[in-house]
Image (cartoon, rainbow, N blue to C red):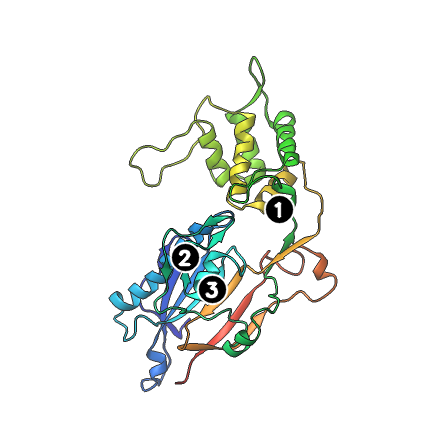
Amino acid sequence: SSKLELVCDPLHKDRTLLTTFKIIQENDDDDNKNKENWHVLNVHLQAGNNGPRRVRQIDEAIKTVFKTAKNKLKESDPTNPILVVCGDFNGGHECGAVRYLEDGEITPEFKEDNMPVTSRVKKMTPGGFFYGDQTKSEDEQKNNKDEEEYPTMIVSELISQLVDPNSPEENPQLSPSVIQSLEEIYDTKYATHSSPETKLMNVENVEQWLIDINKQLNRGSEFRTAAKQMGWEAPPDEENPRYFLPKDSYLTKEGFTNVYQDELRQGKFWGIAYDLAVMGKPLPDKGLYGARFDRMYFSRGRIEPYCTIQTRLDSDESKTKSCPNDVEPSDHLPISATFTIRQS
């Protein structure tokens, strides 16, 4: 935009992106409001059973904001910069990353999926730096702490079908029905190489499977996990090694199911469901799952929302459709806000 100017290069961390800019307008030399740096931290935190990593991701990102404000930009109050944090937290109100932002502190006693999310106390500087979701004012949030949150993600219910209910929360396992489907797919659709005792997927078979699910080779987490299952090992001291399917290697039936077990651990439920459908074993319709994973936070005392927009599916028809659909192009519904500098 011609009204914005970057004040430093964007900073990438673990699934986060910090962009810092200032507002530039004609004839605003005397307007101190337009001389402020605005920091926007966009996040897409790790999905699945990864509460500790999500807390580390948001902790590292917030510290990056403070360091940028203090060391690089020499701001007058680097412990309280103008900051908007927004994106997909891959967790609800109760998850560690959200609680850390809203409460300003997380301790080893806090558990997510029956696991501590940190080994030591982590604190924001100053404590409670953020105040709640952007869709309400501070006063409204204080008075409506228990009000139901509208979902920003509305998708088919999959977890109850994919996860073995008898497996522990901290180590979810594929359900017996999904394992059976994967084994049938392996035996009847892809494994063509016969060994003395069983059929195996050779490199050509694996390539056909990857084209079916990913539309091309050498991409996707299924490809990388399959390569490891087939014996690929990263060269020592190579930071970004190139993955490939080892020549004359095979993907066993156990290795094939291990690929999707790894997808499950990463929280890629919808990816597994898509692959199953492509491979001829679609999951039955079990209704919809809704959750608020997308949030927006702002600096306490520095800025305030002037206008907010939250997308809600209010029609009876839309409430029965998973996203994306013919109305919503994404599985996440958008939220947005306009902010203004708070008057002292």
Q: Residue at x 41, y 29 (%)?
A: 232
Q: Name the quadrant of the C terminus.
A: bottom left
Mark 2–mark 1 CB contact (< 8 Å): no
Q: Which residue is mark 1?
A: 159
Decide which of tag 2 and tag 1 comes sooner along the chain. 2
Furthest-front residue in view?
Answer: 109
Q: Is residue 309 above or below residue 265?
A: below
Mark 3–mark 2 CB contact (< 8 Å): no
- On the image, the x and y values in percent for residue 236 come to 30, 33
The residue closer to the viewer here, 80 or 327, is 80
Image side of residue 173 versus residue 33, left or right: right
Q: Name the quadrant of the N terminus.
A: bottom left
Q: Which residue is mark 2?
A: 107
The residue closer to the viewer here, 29 or 292, is 292
Decide which of tag 3 and tag 2 comes sooner along the chain. 3
Q: Which residue is mark 3?
A: 86
